Image (cartoon, grey):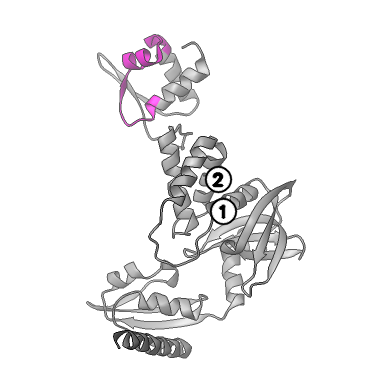
Amino acid sequence: MTDTPARLLNLLSLLQTPREWPGSELAERLDVSPRTIRRDIDRLRDLGYPVEASRGSIGGYRLVAGSAMPPLLLDDEEAVAIAVGLRAGAGHAIEGVDEASVRALAKLEQVLPSRLRQRVSSLQRATVPLTRGDGSTIDPRTLTVIASAATGRERLRFGYRAGDGTASKRQVEPYRLVSTGSRWYLVAYDMDREDWRTFRVDRVNEPFATGARFTPRELPTENGDAAEFIARSMTRMQPELRIDVSFRAPADFVTARLPAILGAVEPTGAGSCRLRTVTSDSLEWVALRLALVDCEFEAHGPPRLVEYLSGLGARLTRASSAGSG
Protein backbone atom coordinates (compact mmCIF):
# COMPACT_ATOMS: atom_id res chain seq x y z
CA MET A 1 0.00 0.00 0.00
CA THR A 2 1.89 3.05 -1.27
CA ASP A 3 -0.82 5.70 -0.67
CA THR A 4 0.35 7.19 2.66
CA PRO A 5 -2.91 9.00 3.65
CA ALA A 6 -5.00 5.91 2.90
CA ARG A 7 -2.53 3.73 4.78
CA LEU A 8 -2.62 6.04 7.81
CA LEU A 9 -6.42 5.89 7.87
CA ASN A 10 -6.37 2.11 7.69
CA LEU A 11 -3.75 1.97 10.43
CA LEU A 12 -5.79 4.30 12.61
CA SER A 13 -8.92 2.21 12.05
CA LEU A 14 -7.08 -0.90 13.26
CA LEU A 15 -5.65 0.87 16.32
CA GLN A 16 -9.09 2.11 17.36
CA THR A 17 -10.15 -1.44 18.16
CA PRO A 18 -9.63 -2.33 21.87
CA ARG A 19 -6.54 -4.53 21.53
CA GLU A 20 -2.79 -4.35 21.17
CA TRP A 21 -1.38 -4.91 17.68
CA PRO A 22 2.08 -6.42 17.14
CA GLY A 23 4.05 -4.37 14.63
CA SER A 24 4.59 -7.42 12.44
CA GLU A 25 0.82 -8.06 12.23
CA LEU A 26 0.12 -4.44 11.32
CA ALA A 27 2.80 -4.62 8.64
CA GLU A 28 1.25 -7.80 7.23
CA ARG A 29 -2.26 -6.32 7.31
CA LEU A 30 -1.16 -3.18 5.45
CA ASP A 31 1.37 -4.94 3.21
CA VAL A 32 4.31 -2.76 4.23
CA SER A 33 7.51 -3.21 6.20
CA PRO A 34 7.75 -2.96 10.01
CA ARG A 35 9.92 0.10 9.49
CA THR A 36 7.09 1.81 7.56
CA ILE A 37 4.71 0.98 10.41
CA ARG A 38 7.08 2.66 12.88
CA ARG A 39 7.21 5.79 10.70
CA ASP A 40 3.41 5.82 10.35
CA ILE A 41 3.00 5.49 14.13
CA ASP A 42 5.24 8.55 14.53
CA ARG A 43 3.06 10.44 12.02
CA LEU A 44 -0.09 9.59 13.99
CA ARG A 45 1.59 10.80 17.18
CA ASP A 46 2.50 14.06 15.45
CA LEU A 47 -1.19 14.44 14.56
CA GLY A 48 -2.15 14.12 18.24
CA TYR A 49 -3.12 10.45 18.41
CA PRO A 50 -1.76 8.92 21.67
CA VAL A 51 -0.30 5.65 20.41
CA GLU A 52 1.45 3.62 23.09
CA ALA A 53 4.17 1.10 22.24
CA SER A 54 5.00 -1.92 24.42
CA ARG A 55 8.51 -3.27 24.75
CA GLY A 56 9.51 -6.87 24.20
CA SER A 57 10.66 -9.34 21.61
CA ILE A 58 7.57 -8.78 19.50
CA GLY A 59 6.38 -5.34 20.62
CA GLY A 60 2.97 -3.92 20.00
CA TYR A 61 0.93 -0.75 19.60
CA ARG A 62 -2.39 0.42 20.95
CA LEU A 63 -4.34 3.67 21.08
CA VAL A 64 -4.79 5.01 24.62
CA ALA A 65 -6.73 7.86 26.20
CA GLY A 66 -5.05 11.21 25.70
CA SER A 67 -5.68 14.79 26.76
CA ALA A 68 -8.02 15.51 23.83
CA MET A 69 -10.61 13.55 21.87
CA PRO A 70 -9.13 12.55 18.48
CA PRO A 71 -11.31 12.04 15.40
CA LEU A 72 -12.85 8.56 15.34
CA LEU A 73 -13.14 6.26 12.36
CA LEU A 74 -16.39 4.28 12.38
CA ASP A 75 -17.40 1.32 10.26
CA ASP A 76 -20.91 1.15 8.78
CA GLU A 77 -22.46 -0.76 11.68
CA GLU A 78 -20.94 1.56 14.31
CA ALA A 79 -22.07 4.70 12.50
CA VAL A 80 -25.63 3.40 12.15
CA ALA A 81 -25.77 2.35 15.81
CA ILE A 82 -24.57 5.75 17.06
CA ALA A 83 -26.91 7.68 14.76
CA VAL A 84 -29.94 5.62 15.82
CA GLY A 85 -29.05 6.08 19.49
CA LEU A 86 -28.57 9.83 19.17
CA ARG A 87 -31.81 10.18 17.20
CA ALA A 88 -33.79 8.26 19.81
CA GLY A 89 -32.40 10.31 22.67
CA ALA A 90 -32.66 13.68 20.95
CA GLY A 91 -36.20 13.13 19.68
CA HIS A 92 -37.55 12.65 23.21
CA ALA A 93 -35.49 15.32 25.00
CA ILE A 94 -34.24 12.81 27.55
CA GLU A 95 -32.69 14.53 30.53
CA GLY A 96 -28.94 14.84 30.06
CA VAL A 97 -29.16 14.66 26.26
CA ASP A 98 -28.44 18.27 25.48
CA GLU A 99 -27.26 20.46 22.62
CA ALA A 100 -23.87 18.76 22.44
CA SER A 101 -25.45 15.42 21.46
CA VAL A 102 -27.61 17.13 18.85
CA ARG A 103 -24.52 18.80 17.38
CA ALA A 104 -22.84 15.38 17.27
CA LEU A 105 -25.88 13.93 15.48
CA ALA A 106 -25.86 16.83 12.99
CA LYS A 107 -22.17 16.24 12.20
CA LEU A 108 -22.63 12.50 11.84
CA GLU A 109 -25.68 12.71 9.56
CA GLN A 110 -23.94 15.30 7.39
CA VAL A 111 -21.25 12.79 6.39
CA LEU A 112 -23.29 9.58 6.41
CA PRO A 113 -23.48 7.99 2.94
CA SER A 114 -27.01 7.85 1.58
CA ARG A 115 -27.19 4.06 2.01
CA LEU A 116 -26.45 4.40 5.75
CA ARG A 117 -28.79 7.35 6.17
CA GLN A 118 -31.57 5.20 4.72
CA ARG A 119 -30.73 2.37 7.13
CA VAL A 120 -30.89 4.76 10.09
CA SER A 121 -34.29 6.08 8.98
CA SER A 122 -35.63 2.57 8.39
CA LEU A 123 -34.50 1.39 11.82
CA GLN A 124 -36.10 4.35 13.52
CA ARG A 125 -39.39 3.93 11.68
CA ALA A 126 -39.47 0.26 12.65
CA THR A 127 -38.76 0.94 16.34
CA VAL A 128 -41.33 2.00 18.92
CA PRO A 129 -39.57 3.52 21.95
CA LEU A 130 -40.93 3.02 25.47
CA THR A 131 -40.85 6.53 26.97
CA ARG A 132 -42.08 8.09 30.21
CA GLY A 133 -44.35 10.51 28.35
CA ASP A 134 -42.81 13.66 29.83
CA GLY A 135 -42.80 15.66 26.61
CA SER A 136 -43.69 15.73 22.95
CA THR A 137 -41.60 13.75 20.50
CA ILE A 138 -39.63 15.63 17.85
CA ASP A 139 -38.39 14.68 14.41
CA PRO A 140 -34.60 14.40 14.92
CA ARG A 141 -34.09 16.07 11.54
CA THR A 142 -35.73 19.21 12.96
CA LEU A 143 -33.17 19.27 15.77
CA THR A 144 -30.20 18.64 13.49
CA VAL A 145 -31.22 21.35 11.01
CA ILE A 146 -31.61 23.87 13.84
CA ALA A 147 -28.34 22.83 15.50
CA SER A 148 -26.42 23.06 12.23
CA ALA A 149 -27.82 26.52 11.51
CA ALA A 150 -26.95 27.75 15.00
CA THR A 151 -23.43 26.36 14.81
CA GLY A 152 -22.89 27.71 11.28
CA ARG A 153 -24.47 31.11 12.15
CA GLU A 154 -26.97 30.74 9.35
CA ARG A 155 -30.44 32.29 9.31
CA LEU A 156 -33.32 29.86 9.63
CA ARG A 157 -36.88 29.79 8.27
CA PHE A 158 -39.66 27.60 9.64
CA GLY A 159 -43.36 27.32 10.26
CA TYR A 160 -44.50 27.74 13.85
CA ARG A 161 -47.69 26.84 15.71
CA ALA A 162 -48.34 28.84 18.87
CA GLY A 163 -50.00 27.44 21.98
CA ASP A 164 -53.41 28.72 20.85
CA GLY A 165 -53.02 27.04 17.46
CA THR A 166 -52.10 30.17 15.50
CA ALA A 167 -49.75 29.34 12.60
CA SER A 168 -47.03 31.69 11.38
CA LYS A 169 -43.85 31.80 9.30
CA ARG A 170 -40.67 32.82 11.08
CA GLN A 171 -37.20 33.91 10.00
CA VAL A 172 -34.69 33.91 12.85
CA GLU A 173 -31.05 34.03 13.80
CA PRO A 174 -30.73 30.81 15.87
CA TYR A 175 -28.68 31.21 19.03
CA ARG A 176 -28.96 28.02 21.10
CA LEU A 177 -31.00 24.86 21.59
CA VAL A 178 -31.90 24.20 25.23
CA SER A 179 -33.31 20.99 26.71
CA THR A 180 -35.31 21.27 29.94
CA GLY A 181 -35.44 17.50 30.37
CA SER A 182 -39.00 17.24 29.01
CA ARG A 183 -38.89 19.59 26.01
CA TRP A 184 -36.50 21.26 23.58
CA TYR A 185 -36.55 25.04 23.11
CA LEU A 186 -34.87 27.28 20.55
CA VAL A 187 -33.55 30.67 21.62
CA ALA A 188 -33.35 32.95 18.58
CA TYR A 189 -33.56 36.53 17.39
CA ASP A 190 -36.80 36.97 15.42
CA MET A 191 -36.07 39.09 12.33
CA ASP A 192 -39.66 40.23 11.75
CA ARG A 193 -40.42 41.09 15.38
CA GLU A 194 -36.93 42.54 15.94
CA ASP A 195 -36.62 40.91 19.33
CA TRP A 196 -35.45 37.75 21.08
CA ARG A 197 -37.92 34.87 21.23
CA THR A 198 -38.15 31.30 22.53
CA PHE A 199 -39.76 28.57 20.42
CA ARG A 200 -40.90 25.11 21.48
CA VAL A 201 -39.18 22.84 18.98
CA ASP A 202 -42.05 20.35 18.90
CA ARG A 203 -44.14 23.21 17.39
CA VAL A 204 -41.58 23.96 14.66
CA ASN A 205 -42.18 22.48 11.23
CA GLU A 206 -40.20 22.35 7.99
CA PRO A 207 -37.12 24.27 9.16
CA PHE A 208 -34.48 25.09 6.57
CA ALA A 209 -31.28 27.11 6.57
CA THR A 210 -31.43 30.05 4.17
CA GLY A 211 -27.70 30.26 3.48
CA ALA A 212 -27.58 33.85 4.76
CA ARG A 213 -24.86 34.25 7.39
CA PHE A 214 -25.18 36.53 10.41
CA THR A 215 -23.04 37.96 13.20
CA PRO A 216 -24.39 36.68 16.54
CA ARG A 217 -26.13 39.31 18.65
CA GLU A 218 -25.64 39.62 22.38
CA LEU A 219 -28.30 37.72 24.30
CA PRO A 220 -29.75 39.95 27.06
CA THR A 221 -28.67 37.70 29.95
CA GLU A 222 -25.54 37.46 32.03
CA ASN A 223 -22.79 35.80 29.96
CA GLY A 224 -25.30 35.08 27.18
CA ASP A 225 -26.83 32.20 29.15
CA ALA A 226 -29.57 30.68 26.97
CA ALA A 227 -30.86 28.46 29.78
CA GLU A 228 -31.39 31.52 31.97
CA PHE A 229 -33.24 33.23 29.11
CA ILE A 230 -35.52 30.19 28.76
CA ALA A 231 -36.19 30.16 32.51
CA ARG A 232 -37.17 33.86 32.44
CA SER A 233 -39.43 33.32 29.44
CA MET A 234 -41.20 30.39 31.07
CA THR A 235 -41.74 32.41 34.23
CA ARG A 236 -43.36 35.21 32.22
CA MET A 237 -45.56 32.77 30.28
CA GLN A 238 -47.27 31.27 33.33
CA PRO A 239 -47.31 31.85 37.08
CA GLU A 240 -45.01 29.85 39.31
CA LEU A 241 -46.28 26.99 41.43
CA ARG A 242 -44.84 26.75 44.94
CA ILE A 243 -45.23 23.04 45.52
CA ASP A 244 -45.30 21.45 48.96
CA VAL A 245 -45.98 17.69 48.93
CA SER A 246 -45.35 14.89 51.46
CA PHE A 247 -44.74 11.32 50.26
CA ARG A 248 -45.17 8.11 52.28
CA ALA A 249 -42.15 6.47 50.70
CA PRO A 250 -38.35 6.65 51.07
CA ALA A 251 -36.60 9.60 49.46
CA ASP A 252 -34.62 7.44 46.99
CA PHE A 253 -37.84 5.75 45.80
CA VAL A 254 -39.52 9.12 45.12
CA THR A 255 -36.39 10.68 43.59
CA ALA A 256 -36.13 7.86 41.04
CA ARG A 257 -39.71 8.51 39.90
CA LEU A 258 -39.76 12.32 39.77
CA PRO A 259 -38.19 14.40 36.98
CA ALA A 260 -35.07 16.17 38.22
CA ILE A 261 -36.51 19.46 36.93
CA LEU A 262 -38.89 19.44 39.93
CA GLY A 263 -35.98 19.59 42.34
CA ALA A 264 -34.76 17.40 45.18
CA VAL A 265 -36.88 15.75 47.86
CA GLU A 266 -35.92 15.97 51.54
CA PRO A 267 -36.04 12.82 53.73
CA THR A 268 -38.35 13.27 56.72
CA GLY A 269 -38.01 9.71 58.04
CA ALA A 270 -37.02 6.21 57.04
CA GLY A 271 -40.15 5.82 54.92
CA SER A 272 -41.18 9.39 54.14
CA CYS A 273 -39.96 12.53 52.40
CA ARG A 274 -41.13 15.98 51.34
CA LEU A 275 -40.86 18.04 48.17
CA ARG A 276 -40.77 21.82 48.44
CA THR A 277 -40.00 23.50 45.15
CA VAL A 278 -41.00 26.21 42.69
CA THR A 279 -41.83 25.38 39.08
CA SER A 280 -43.23 27.09 36.01
CA ASP A 281 -44.60 23.86 34.57
CA SER A 282 -48.34 23.52 34.10
CA LEU A 283 -50.63 22.52 36.97
CA GLU A 284 -51.86 19.49 34.99
CA TRP A 285 -48.35 18.22 34.27
CA VAL A 286 -47.28 18.55 37.91
CA ALA A 287 -50.37 16.68 39.10
CA LEU A 288 -49.73 13.87 36.63
CA ARG A 289 -46.08 13.56 37.66
CA LEU A 290 -47.03 13.36 41.33
CA ALA A 291 -49.57 10.63 40.61
CA LEU A 292 -47.00 8.62 38.63
CA VAL A 293 -44.70 8.34 41.66
CA ASP A 294 -46.93 5.40 42.64
CA CYS A 295 -47.12 5.90 46.40
CA GLU A 296 -49.37 7.63 48.92
CA PHE A 297 -48.81 11.40 49.07
CA GLU A 298 -50.43 14.54 50.45
CA ALA A 299 -50.36 17.93 48.74
CA HIS A 300 -50.11 20.84 51.20
CA GLY A 301 -50.07 23.55 48.58
CA PRO A 302 -50.67 25.57 46.58
CA PRO A 303 -54.46 25.52 47.04
CA ARG A 304 -55.16 25.22 43.32
CA LEU A 305 -52.96 22.11 43.10
CA VAL A 306 -54.85 20.58 46.04
CA GLU A 307 -58.16 21.42 44.36
CA TYR A 308 -57.04 20.01 41.00
CA LEU A 309 -55.82 16.75 42.56
CA SER A 310 -59.14 16.40 44.39
CA GLY A 311 -61.06 16.81 41.15
CA LEU A 312 -58.72 14.46 39.30
CA GLY A 313 -59.14 11.81 41.98
CA ALA A 314 -62.92 12.10 41.81
CA ARG A 315 -62.90 11.73 38.01
CA LEU A 316 -60.66 8.67 38.19
CA THR A 317 -62.90 7.11 40.85
CA ARG A 318 -66.00 7.66 38.69
CA ALA A 319 -64.17 6.19 35.69
CA SER A 320 -63.22 3.03 37.57
CA SER A 321 -66.74 2.68 39.01
CA ALA A 322 -68.31 3.02 35.57
CA GLY A 323 -66.01 0.30 34.24
CA SER A 324 -66.88 -2.15 37.01
CA GLY A 325 -70.62 -1.66 36.47
Q: Which mark is residue 143?
A: 1
301 to 191, vertically: above or below: below
Magenta stretch: give its range.
14-36
Q: Is residue 219 left or right of residue 73?
A: right
Q: Quadrant of residue 251?
A: bottom left
Element class at badge 2: helix
**Can residue 219 be seen from the camera position used here?**
no
The answer to which of 96 and 288 lies nearer the viewer is: 288
Name the kind of residue labelled 1 in the image: Leu
Q: Which mark is residue 106?
A: 2
Q: Are marks 1 and 2 in contact (CB under 8 Å)?
A: yes
Front one among 223 and 291: 291
Q: Earlier in the sequence, mark 1 or mark 2?
A: 2
Where is residue 255? Give x, y as percent. 33, 70
> Residue drawn at (68%, 71%), measured in percent from left and top?
166
- Front residue of 39/134: it is 134
The crowd level at tag 1 (other Cα within 10 Å; few <14, some 14-19, many 20+) is many
The disc labelled 2 sits on which kind of residue? Ala
Q: Is residue 24 magenta?
A: yes
